[in-house]
């Protein structure tokens, strides 16, 4: 029987017989996906000064990363790399949308990032970006006093770690390791 599912992190709905193992929009793991009628999702969170600063920085990180990935999807010299970077760009854009909702902004700001033609350089840049995001999100989760903000940052650590594994795997494969 087809059901309506909802991600607790991004709030987006999914139609299927069973919940996806990861949110097809933001990449959150299955533990954050509930049947829509049972999902409690909210973005109206009272932000402390520190949470606001961390959310604003997270928005910048996600806009920068999504812009980089969309550039890499167009420019990279590897067909699979084009697909990977396009998928990562969509996920990072969804992460930016989460912070837009938390910050009550009318739209996600535009980013301007460059990328490389060489797939390996894009993978290396991807790896560095994901490591920086993970470190920041881990710190921001620890600093937050609000459960919902901690939940989002913690989920993003896991999602970005998945992205880190993707780049690491491809970098190792390209080296012949």
Image (cartoon, helix red, strand yellow):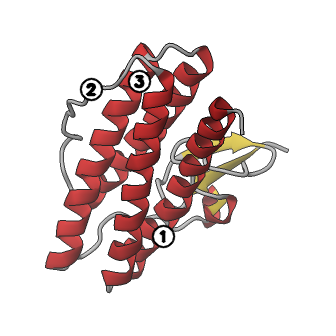
Decide: is 142 above or below 108: below
Is residue 149 visible in the rendered image? The answer is yes
Tag 1's secondary structure?
helix
Disc 1/disc 3 C-alpha distance (Å): 27 Å
Q: Work out whether mark 2 precedes mark 1 in sequence or the reverse, and give the earlier one.
A: 2
Contact? badges 1 and 3 (CB < 8 Å): no
Looking at the image, is mark 2 or mark 1 nearer the viewer? 2
- In screen coordinates, is 81 left or right of 116? right
Tag 2's secondary structure?
loop
Q: Residue 46 at x, y = what percent? A: 23, 76
Q: Work out whether mark 3 precedes mark 2 in sequence or the reverse, and give the earlier one.
A: 3
Disc 3/disc 2 C-alpha distance (Å): 8 Å
Q: What residue is pinned by disc 1?
A: 154
Which numbered dot is residue 72?
3
Q: Residue 77 at x, y = what percent? A: 50, 13
Decide: is 171 above or below 102: above
Which numbered dot is residue 114?
2
Count of labels in the image: 3
């Amino acid at each position: 029987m087809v059901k309506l599912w909802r991600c607790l992190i991004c709030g987006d709905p999914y139609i299927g017989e069973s919940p996806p193992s990861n949110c097809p929009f933001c990449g959150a793991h299955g533990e954050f996906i509930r049947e829509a009628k049972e999902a409690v999702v909210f973005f109206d969170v009272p932000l402390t000064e520190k949470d606001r600063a961390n959310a604003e920085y997270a928005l910048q990180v996600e806009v920068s990363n999504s812009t980089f990935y969309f550039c890499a999807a167009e420019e990279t010299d590897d067909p699979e790399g084009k697909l990977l970077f396009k998928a990562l760009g969509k996920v990072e854009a969804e992460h930016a949308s989460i912070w837009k909702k938390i910050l009550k902004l009318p739209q996600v700001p535009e980013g301007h990032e460059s990328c490389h033609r060489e797939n390996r350089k894009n993978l290396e840049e991807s790896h560095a970006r994901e490591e920086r995001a993970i470190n920041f999100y881990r710190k921001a989760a620890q600093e937050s006093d609000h459960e919902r903000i901690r939940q989002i940052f913690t989920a993003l650590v896991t999602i970005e770690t998945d992205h880190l594994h993707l780049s690491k795997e491809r970098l190792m494969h390209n080296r012949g390791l």
